[in-house]
Amino acid sequence: MTGVSSQMERAFTPLKIAVDTGRIPGGVLGIIDRAGKRAVRAIGAAQLVPERRAMTESTWFDLASLTKGVFTTERILALAASGAIELDAPLISVLPDFRQYNADNWERKITFRQCLGHQTPFPAVFPIYTYGRDPDLLRAFVLQHEWQAGPAVYSDINYILLGLALERIEKRPIRAMDPGAGFAWSADATQAAATEDCTWRNRVLVGEVHDDNCAALAGSGHAGLFGTADSLLDFAEAKLNHAGEDDLIRTPLSARRTHGWERPYEGWSGGEICSASTIGHTGFTGTGLWIDFERGHAWTLLTNRVHPTRHFDSGIIALRRAVGDQINAG
């Protein structure tokens, strides 16, 4: 047994243990190798409450922050390649009204490239959804709020702003920009993995976006995309087949990040033995995608680890690393 089948046999074991011990309800693991051969396997439950449904290989998942790499980064880099934007230009070249009442603030100097690499002073988290239910008003809030500057950290605000720039350029809502997978509004709820029993929407979320801010904004650049294991492997295969055309997603911007993706560092989600030319990204709901350009393979681990609540130690960090190490072993 060689290639993708042996990788699957090894890597599926830690996922099975996580499901069997009740750490996560269910998951789907997908792998593609250098020859384009792929394997996808599912285990456990897509939903536990209020009713139980089995996980399948074709289950749709709320990809959460995978939206950043798979959708928003792709759109921004395509615009840069076409000359429509300059990556080192400030966001105000597209969003001139961003913090318009104070022309000399730091926010107006933030560039597209800085947002792609999370090299800005925006806060790591901010509960935009608590400021109202009107998406247009919340967009205005994001643009005019006086953001408190801090150290450069991974921040959804970077990609919310990139999403607003995309909407301004394309003159349509981000949820109308179909990337070939689907946003929450086009996913079939009966085929989707459940996420959280939401405390402010008062229901178990199935086929609608889990991220609070994305839901309140009715679509944004940092979350909201739905997809299957096969759709993510299709994306990865395209990247592996056109590696020379995707230099920026592999080009480091910091010790941990490229344009839109993470790169290997000690303790990262892809495990310890992937090649240095691997990129990856994870999503809060329990999703992830990793592409190893040197070895020519990729893998996606999709789980519903926040179902029915995020307030539980699912062990997702250790699970991701264990799966990555097993895929890259031997």
Image (cartoon, grey):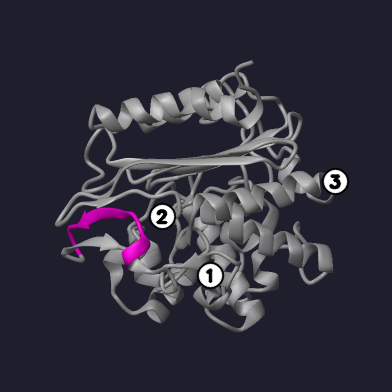
**Residue type beneath disc 2:** Thr
The amino acid type, in three-letter code, at marker 3 is: Gly
The earlier-in-sequence mark between 1 and 3 is 1
Residue at image coords 14%, 57%: 50
Q: Which residue is drawn at 54% across and 27% down?
A: 324
Q: What stretch is highlighted in magenta?
A: 190-200
Q: In which quarter of the image is the C terminus?
A: top right
Q: Is residue 128 visible?
A: no
Q: Where is residue 106 in the image (x, y as percent from the top left)?
A: 59, 57
Where disc 2 sits, the SS reads loop
Residue at (48% x, 51% y) in the render: 65
Would you name the residue on which mark 3 appears?
Answer: 244
Quadrant the N terminus occupies: top right
Q: Nearer the viewer, residue 83 or 147?
A: 83
Report which residue position mark 1 lands on. Answer: 99
Q: Which of 229 and 283 is in front in this view?
A: 229
- Secondary element type, mark 1: loop
Disc 1 from disc 2: Cα separation = 41 Å
Residue 90 located within the stretch drawn in magenta: no
Q: Which labelled disc corresponds to residue 59?
A: 2
How far across and how far down the image is residue 289, in percent?
Answer: 55, 42
- Left or right of 51, for residue 128: right
Q: Give the Cα separation between the discs numbered 1 and 3.
A: 38 Å
Q: In this view, does 325 lie above or below 138?
A: above
